[in-house]
Amino acid sequence: MVDVPAAGGLRVGARPSRAGLDRRVLLGAALLLVIGAVTLAPVLYVLIASFDVSSIGEPFKFGWKGWQDVFSSTRTLDAIGYSFLLSARVPIAVIVAFTIAWLLVRVEVPGRRFIELALWFGFFLPSVPMMMGWILLLDANYGLLNAAAMKLPFVTGPIFSIYSIPGIMWVHLSLTTIPVMVILLTPALRQLDAAYEEAADMSGAGTWMTLRRITVPLVAPAILTAFVASLIRSLETFEVEQILGTPAKIYVYATRIYDLINWEPPLFSQAMALSALFLAILFVLAFFYQRYLRRAGERPTVMGRDVKLRARPKTAWVYVISFVLIAYIAVSILLPLAVLIVGSFTKLFGFFFLEDAWTAGHWREVLTDDRFLRATLNSLALGLTVGCIGTLLFALVAWCLVRGKVWGGNVISILVWLPWAIPGLVLGVTLLSLLLNVPLISGLYGTIVPLIMALIIKELPIGVQLLRTSLSQISGQLEEAASMSGAGFAYIFRRVTLPLIAPMLVSVFLLVFAGTIRDISTIVLIATPGMRTLSLLMFDFAASGRFESAAVIGIIIAVISLAMTAFAFRMGERFGVKRK
Amino acid sequence: MLQVKDLCKTYLADGGKPVAAMQSVSFEVPRGKMFALLGPSGCGKTTTLRSIAGLETPDSGEILVEDSVVYSSGKRVHVASNKRGFGMVFQSYAIWPHMSVFDNAAFPLLVPNRKRKYSQAEIRDKVLRVLGVVALDGLEDRPATQLSGGQQQRLALARAIVTEPKLLLLDEPLSNLDAKLRERMRFELKRLQEELAITTVYVTHDQSEALALAHQIAVMNSGRIVQIGGPRDIYERPGDSFVAEFVGTTNFFSGEVLQANGRPNGYVVRTQLGNMEIDNCAPMSAGDKVVVSVRPEYVQVGNSAMAGPNSWEGTVDTQIFLGFCQDLELKLNGALVQARAHPSLHLQAGAKVYASIDPAGCAICR
């Protein structure tokens, strides 16, 4: 149905024309080939390497030893246990984030634009420096909040300890899990035709019943996407667990893999065997997710006309809610950021109360560093390229899956999840060995191209999933109408499809952009010295103990992200569907 | 039963320019009657309906149902829409796609209610009965997404009336149906409304729907009610040229009153057609500038000269054969006049023709 205008209106119930069928098979096969190649290659690499028991330099030797060793170690089992314990933050985040998203969209609390922007901003903030901010606040010995709390009566010891399970969960919840879920759920709620809720309202249902029986079931696909995505990310995250977990002897799945790779000599087969377990979990999740979506039917909930929202009448409660949300933002995002900024001006990171504690030296040092300018340009170039190309590509793939009814669509839907199953480091290793060993593409090593490819692959799952849910909520008739007006596929896609999903496109672009400029693990191995990005530079500084300089770069990344968020919001408003 | 008093609402349009959606809209609907709000899109009819529903808050005014206030800007009362106990059918139907037909219709009964808690058996009984009323019996276990447009419309209606509400609000309920189905549903709705004797407010832009269904019609234009009356009043005695043109087709002749013609409330008006006799209109005096509205069906057409007042000779300009009648455009004294004639009359474009206008079929618009 790509550009066969005559058949466009007859699709429902009619047998597809011969030409349409061929086109679908061809398109499907091409898509299957490309997506299959980029997603399956790292998976195969993981599986093969997990059975490779040779030492470094030797040819491949098959054996089960890696699997046996890794799963007989109690540390591995503990790590898996801790990983699942820590992933309990995901259901908590779903409830909190849905509440916030609903308040923002349906209740229209005052200051909602600020709150939404702040959550985006919070999500953009690089996690390592923000975590350093939290350490300054919550450390059991010198944390500012603990020190303040001890001044209260009846408090004898430190209340908070960041090096603990609740500490790790809090850092994740406040910096990533809740913001990203609000970001994912807000557009879904915004696209929901308000008449569904108004009909419940007119049936006499109260807010709670409408939420429970109408709103939540209707946005369930989006909630599930957010849930599965966050669950997988929660199993994959690494830097926070490494720094906060190690002192408390909390090891998780991802830090365990890192340990195994960093072993002397590296225990690759064990690391890969553990990665394979993760792959299996992901397969199960993706399978059930897919089955659920099929059962729920990808039913359109946007009718084309009447995409209007109704604000509830403002009452005093609205201002209370607004106050609570803004207070939450202030505590969860602004406070650690403020401490971080102050920290970047200290001579010794975190020591605020020394005599003569302050200096602007770190800022001067970073800003005059040659590497800084190059890294800034690299980050921007990479973020914009990956953001634009990626978003468009993901939209095309999502369109093929939802509307194109391409051949092999089911398989492709599962395949697009795969890049998430692979820790960034492993994806990097795979690409590196491909770059060094395959003659045709080895010329690309040292350019920006492999970085772009790696990051697009990395962001493929979230991008495609989000745009899919968004597209499936839009009635196909809107595109068919354009087709009947004589428009070709490219024109329809540009003038009808993309504007209709503009809010989600903006979200995906921002997610990809943020993911790109934050990324360390995927590109750390393939970025040659000329290709260092701001995050890598920050990582280099932190690794060599220069926390103050790392904090400076973290703040600069945050500022770039803020500017990008504001800009993208503007664009989304200009090109999206106008809402009253 | 329903009293709407002086509703006003102003929106800020995209450019920040204020747009008056309602300008002191007032009307009353007696118990058991159907009242239609008729007007072009953007005239404020939907805003009025949504204000009655409580889905929108007017800037000022008052809404009373059975003498109890549901909205009043003066008394600072705004009963929430879910506490008003009205039924509503939405233009898009808003049938919940994740529920079966039964669950959609049963939803209003499942709402926790202090007055009345329904048992499972009662709910089943009520839902099956209401589905029977709208002729959806036997489909209760279907997923709602598998219903056709007409079935969805009836399900939306079933959901709206299952609690036997005091007031039923219909927002363009037939506009998404095809013509045949729309005509059938028109009869169904009328029968249902009379059977249930449920007070109904009906929003539509389709004049024939309003004429067919409503006991009273309010014609709205740019936020104001321009005329309220029974279907016959509105059609035969339109208050102004907007109403005359919006409700049906009409010919306008502007002219000047010459004198009374001797019959009670009868006048002679000079128009571009010549002097016209007009009966049964409000008192006027000589020299008044007026617009005369003549419905095409009051223009009598024939092959031979006609006696009586308002008779002219002319030619057929265009002719459209519609089966049950034919629409003609005649050239009389240089003016184009639309006429509707019996299909048995054989006329060709260009043919000579005689026409006369019944003085009682003319209405004066100002």
Image (spheres, helix red, strand yellow):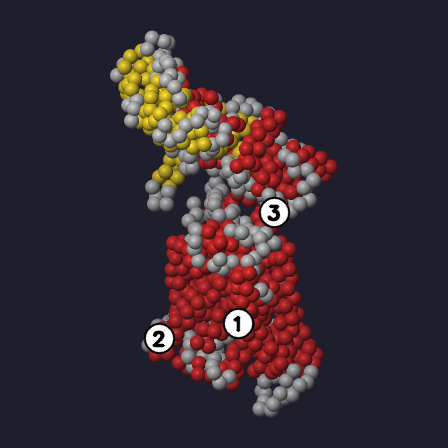
Are discs 3 and 2 located on one and the same chain? no
Percent from the top left, x then y, of residue B189?
Answer: 58, 31
In the image, what residue type sits under mark 2?
Answer: Leu
- Given this view, does label 3 or label 2 mark the residue nearer the observer? 3
* Between B298 and B233, the one nearer to me in the picture: B298
Are discs 1 and 3 located on one and the same chain? no
Q: Residue furthest left?
A: B287
Q: Residue furthest right?
A: B121
Task: Find numbered disc 2 in the image and state the secondary structure of the residue it sits on.
Answer: helix
Percent from the top left, x then y, of residue B113?
Answer: 64, 36
* Between A401 and A364, the one nearer to me in the picture: A401
- Tag 3 residue: B145
**Residue A183 visible in rendering:** no
Percent from the top left, x then y, of residue A134?
Answer: 50, 66
- Given this view, does label 1 or label 2 mark the residue nearer the observer? 1
Drawn side of residue A139 relative to residue A288, left or right: left
Can you tell which quarter of the image residue A355 is in? Answer: bottom left
Note whether B354 is above or below A295 in the view shown.
above
- Tag 1 residue: A34
Note whether A153 is above or below B260 in the view shown.
below
**Residue B279 visible in rendering:** yes
User: Badge 2 sits on which subunit?
Assistant: A
Percent from the top left, x then y, of residue A519?
Answer: 48, 72
- Tag 2 residue: A373
Q: Tell me the crowding category of disc 3: few under 14, some 14 to 19, or many 20 or more residues within 10 angstroms, Cα based.
A: some
